[in-house]
Image (cartoon, rainbow, N blue to C red):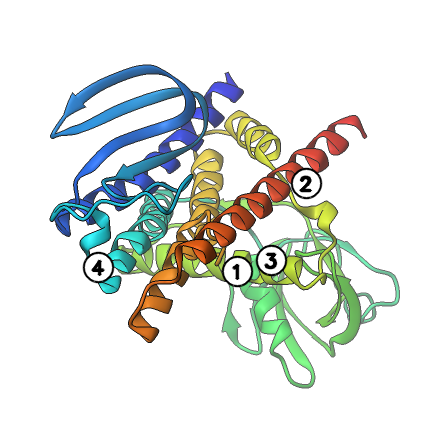
Amino acid sequence: MGIVISLLVLSGLIFFHELGHYFAARLMGVYVEVFSIGFGKRLFTFQKWGTEWSISAVPLGGYVRMKGQDDSDPTKKSFDLDSYNTKTPIQKIFILLAGPAANFVLAFMLYFAIALGSPNVLSPVIGTVVKDSPAFLAGLDSNDTITAINGVSITTWKEMAELIKISQGSLDLTIDRNGYLEHKVLTPKIQSAKNMFGEDVKRKMIGISSAGVTHKLELSPSETLGYATEQTIFASTMIFTGVKKLLFGEVPAKELGGVISIVKITADASDDGWMSVLFFAALISVNLGVLNLLPIPALDGGHIMFNLYELIFRREASEAIMMKFTIAGWVILFALMGLGLFNDINRLIN
């Protein structure tokens, strides 16, 4: 059941991405010939609004084929008024950006739905205290709840961590211990830790870990909008940073995951309830938006690159150059997919 849910989630995200391209193309007066979810043999198809809508056998992608645009052969063109080729570079870029934009909008909507459902967040309850750490020397103990730092009230573990991170000098911690409030003064130490990319970083720490206690995050309407915006920006920044680190070798290539990882993690998330599925779906949606903006000719970012060239130099790139870059783009894309698949299989074996 988990695998079915993961495939439905992936197909749904791809559908929204392609729907962005579809509506933008129609808005610009471009005829859309085919709208397909999946590749390969067509399992189901129907004709509506002048477009052939299809569901194909391999549900690991999708595409919108516009009149005059063929990724497999960029030299094939049509110069009819309703063709993609007759549109200005700005109009083409608008069509190309609409797909990734749809993914970011969908992610925002998913995070908004999560916020309405009152997501669980970590409470600032201490689990373990590291021996001889600032927290240990100040007398903090397991099951203490930190309620304020330097007079600033906190309700989540994240808020506590952020205040420690930006702190200057000593901290006055207000803790709840068995219903009684106490004050503990300590000074964080700069220590080595691992960030979300597995890199060694230096950060201020006091030597505690979470007890794993959670509570429901109750948000007002304005806070709900703020939560959805914050989470969308955070996810986008995290993925942009991760891609940059991967490209510059700051994160090992073995960390790259493929479709098996997506299916497995989504399937695992489905076991933890709909909230976990929405969280991961929002993250994948942002991932699709970011990755499609990479300047690889087989992706939206590559086509945007060609159109920017035309916009700046007032002429299209030569057909020979476009063909070479397109072939190179497909090689890079398949190489990345192959590496992700190899890493997925390697993880499953190990």
* Residue type for callout 1: Phe
> Percent from the top left, x then y, of residue 188?
74, 75
Residue 176, by quadrant, is bottom right
The residue identified by callout 2 is: 339
Q: Secondary structure at mark 2?
A: helix
Residue 293 in sight from this viewpoint = no
The residue identified by callout 3 is: 242
Disc 3 crowd rating (10 Å Cα; few below 14, some 14-19, many 20+) is some
Disc 4 crowd rating (10 Å Cα; few below 14, some 14-19, many 20+) is some
* Residue type for callout 3: Gly
The residue identified by callout 4 is: 91
Q: Secondary structure at mark 4?
A: helix
* Residue type for callout 4: Gln
Q: Which tag is nearer the camera, tag 4 or tag 1?
A: 4
The residue identified by callout 1 is: 240
Given residues 168 and 12, the one toward you in this image is 12
